Image: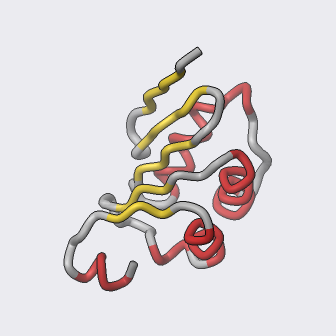
């Protein structure tokens, strides 16, 4: 990730990479070419670590926007029954249901 940032290369973080990022948020902080793709469990960990609160499904879009903004404008694709994506400014949703 550090090398990708040095050369301005976009990257996607999923799975074990999200565990690493959750514990070392500076790896992606303020790097708008980073895309995080957490599942429900990974998203919960990110919210707890970065926003210091629990996931609030009633405010899912606002919370996702706040999370992406707090990390410095990274793009977050929150996977679920309805996928939500935000860069800290806008939120879009996609559902096949």
Task: State the colouring used for the structure image.
Answer: secondary structure
User: Where is 88 relative to 80, above or below?
Assistant: below
The quarter of the picture where residue 21 lies is bottom right
- Residue 22: percent from left, percent from top: 63, 69
Residue visible at 67% across and 29% down in the picture: 59
Between 46 and 82, the one lying in front of the other is 82
Residue visible at 59% across and 14% down in the picture: 97
- Residue 57: percent from left, percent from top: 73, 30
Between 72 and 15, the one lying in front of the other is 15
Residue 8 as seen in the image, left or right of residue 88: left
- Residue 64: percent from left, percent from top: 56, 41
Quadrant where the image shows the N terminus: bottom left
Between 26 and 42, the one lying in front of the other is 42
User: Where is 78 relative to 43, above or below?
Assistant: above
Judged from this view, the residue extending furthest toward the front is 96
Residue visible at 59% across and 66% down in the picture: 18
Judged from this view, the residue extending furthest toward the top is 97
User: Where is 9 relative to 87, above or below?
Assistant: below
The quarter of the picture where residue 10 lies is bottom left
Between 33 and 66, the one lying in front of the other is 33
Residue visible at 31% across and 85% down in the picture: 3
- Residue 28: percent from left, percent from top: 44, 70
Residue 85 as seen in the image, left or right of residue 63: left
Q: How many marks?
A: 0
Judged from this view, the residue extending furthest toward the right is 54
The quarter of the picture where residue 80 lies is top right
């Amino acid at each position: 990730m550090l090398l990708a940032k040095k050369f301005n290369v976009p990257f996607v973080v999923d799975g074990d990479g999200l565990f690493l990022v959750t514990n070392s948020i500076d790896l992606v902080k303020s790097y708008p070419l980073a895309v995080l793709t957490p599942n429900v469990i990974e998203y919960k960990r990110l919210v707890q670590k970065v926003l210091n609160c629990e996931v609030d499904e009633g405010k899912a879009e606002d919370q996702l926007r706040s999370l992406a903004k707090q990390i410095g404008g990274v793009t977050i694709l929150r996977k679920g029954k309805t996928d939500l994506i935000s860069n800290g400014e806008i939120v879009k949703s996609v559902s096949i249901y």
